[in-house]
Amino acid sequence: MERGHEVTAGVFPDEVVTKATTRLITVPGLDGRVALITLDNGFDHTKPNTFGPGGLTSLNEAFDEAVAAEPAAIAVTGKPFIFAVGADLTGVEQVADRATALQIAQLGHDVFRRFTDSGIPTFAFVNGAVMGGGLELALSCHYRTLASNAAAISFPEVFLGLFPGWGGTQLLPNLIGADKAVTVIIENALSQNKMLKPAQAAQFGIVDVLLESADYLEQSLLWLADVVNGKTTPQRPEIDRGEAWDAAIARAKAIVDGKTHGASPGATKAVELLELARRNDLTAGYAAETEALADVLMTDELRAGLYSFNLVQKRARRPAGAPDKSLARPVTKVGIVGAGLMASQMALLFARRLHVPVVLTDIDQARVDKGVGYVHTEVDKLAGKKRISPDEANRLKALVSGSLDKAAFADADFVIEAVFEDLEVKQQVFAEVEEHVSAECVLATNTSSLSITDMAAKLKHPERVVGFHFFNPVAVMPLLEIIRADRTDDATLATAFKVGKELKKSSVLVKDAPAFVVNRLLTRFLGEITAALDEGTPFEVADHALDPLGLPMTPMILLQLVGPAVGLHVAEIMHNAFPDRFGVSENMKRFVEAGKTAVWQWDAQGNQTLDPEVAALWKPGDSPSTGEQLLDRTLVALADEVRRMLDEGVVAEAQDIDLCLILGAGWPFWLGGITPYLDRAGISERVTGKRFLAQGVASVPAS
């Protein structure tokens, strides 16, 4: 154990060691004391407990101390609100060779298995957030309690391009069954790292008992005493290792194939290990996990996943180029021009996060009533699901109102428009709003592609206009593109970033350029797909050409989600700006004019076929491409566009483009946005003569 720590400690030079300390506690009614091991890295809740070589060694030593005291039971818990959230990912990035990766994998197994093999009963008191390796430590114990206010419970590894490699793939299915384990390890992870709520964790059987947080530790110790004394025997389900396991593995394979198209080695390996767990042989299972973890830790996909993780966890919290936050003005009331679906979603978000009055306006009372009604209905749904209290529901409904008169914005500090994507319409809206609001009121636009500078050009105070581009659905998508126009001042920009943070969005500063970041790149790559279709490439070939990237959806499904009319409108805007690179398809025009919203149709069995009406109206050429040719062509186009955007200063660095694609377009973590992939594939240098990122970033370092 010590040898493993010595070898791997140098790889984690900046490890914030989570120290494990042991104390003996007397529990009423229990013959003998409890050795309670507490995990604490010495920071507040903003830096959770993690496990690197130092932390694992400390836990091992604490276990030695606990055993030496000959207690009636051994329990492990965390610092306030946090149990542990897994491996120290910052150190993993520095692993340069497979031998070191193998030692890290083995070290975690060696320490955690001591809790499983212990002749003394072991308990995990999961007092707060628990993820990844932290959850594997809890599963390694014989029994588990969980605080009812635990904020986050998950196995996020597959989301990152990894898999639970310190026992998770072997312990969980043998505790709760293969199907539920597939849900937690694979399905939830590939659904944007969906978390379990405490009640769900208890319902699944991941923990034995759910206890209130007020006196959680005391109640956990009393429950421990009952278990040790034989008064309480936790019920464990009988595990079906036959047809139910077969069905679970088939479901896992379908999810992984549908979500990753084989592009994530970690996801594929997770399925294999879950199948291996059917044997319920921990020695064989752990050996397979160790070897697989060493392999996956050395893949480019895992490095890209860690790169993505750092972007989301660090860069997104400190937006590049954002002005001093002290310049931000207070926002005590919000106005929204428009009362359609997007505007109504924004109204609900502003009310929930800012807790200030929100007023919707539109051209007639019916639209206003519909918008306010949408908000009230959504609030009722939240209350019905007990996500908010009845009192909170009443407060939110009272905050959101509607008016036909923009004079209702007179005391607003922040007004955002969400009307039709037409420059003249938006200019007129802002001119009307400016007649009623103060000179300091921020005027924001949710435009997806139009020039903010042009929108503000005719106003008395163009300096207070800013782009505030949400992604649909507003409540779910975390990205907010904040666009600085030519005359936007620092106070306006600072206020926009402050509001974005209060809305719990990740904001990226973007220059006022056509379609900004996400829509510009999506339009470029959709343009290549559409052009290939026009040339005669079959729909099936074109729609699956990008499958090797493991994107969340195919191009034609993306077009359906965005809306063909919207996609065509943005393509026309981009064609006007850059006619040499962005075309407008005559076939797509006919497609939109015919009112078609999708290329594919599905029968009752879920079989996908080309809509015959689409086939009839599309007029293809006679120069089809293969899938491989179209993939290369699309990646070349993306590399070209990314380089142009960086040269134009659309964002500060390539990392911001990657962050936008991850948070705004759902690009998978294991892809690392787009620039690491283009660098690894050699396309960056082939197209632009240089890489986007420094050598070694998001790729396996040279050993």
Image: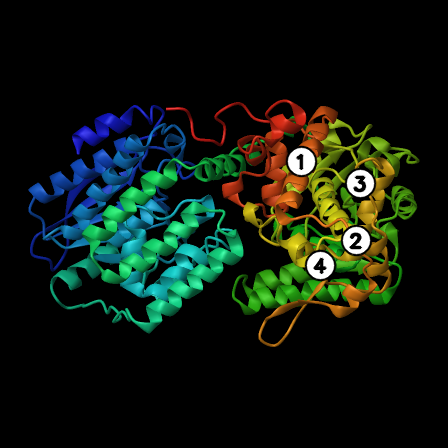
Q: Residue furthest toward the bottom?
A: 604
Which comes before the other along the chain, label 4 or label 3? 4
Q: Position of residue 412 (x, y in %)?
A: 78, 45
User: For the residue carrying disc 3, how many other residues have a C-alpha within 10 Å: few (<14), some (14-19), or many (20+)?
Assistant: many
Q: Amino acid at mark 2?
A: Val
| Residue marked by disc 3 | 582
Mark positioned earlier in the residue sequence (1 or 4): 4
Where in the figure is residue 51, as x and y percent of width and height?
31, 37
CA gap, disc 1 and disc 3: 14 Å
Badge 1 is on which residue? Answer: 636
Whether pointer 1 and pointer 2 mark residues with C-beta atoms closer than 8 Å, the reply is: no
Residue found at x 28% / y 69%: 241
| Nearer-N-terminus badge (2/4) | 4
Q: Amino acid at mark 1?
A: Val
Residue occupied by mark 2? 566
Q: Residues within 10 Å of mark 4 (few under 14, many from 20)?
A: some
N-terminal of the pair, mark 1 or mark 2, is 2
Q: Earlier in the sequence, mark 1 or mark 3?
A: 3
Residue 394, quarter of picture: bottom right
Closer mark to the observer between disc 2 and disc 4: 4
Q: Is disc 4 placed on a helix, strand or loop?
A: helix
User: Viewer-proximal residue, 607 or 396?
Assistant: 607
Whether residue 329 is visible, yes or no, is no
Query: The disc labelled 4 sits on which kind of residue?
Result: Gln
Does 610 sit above or below residue 26? below
Query: Which one is earlier in the sequence, the residue at label 3 or at label 2?
Result: 2
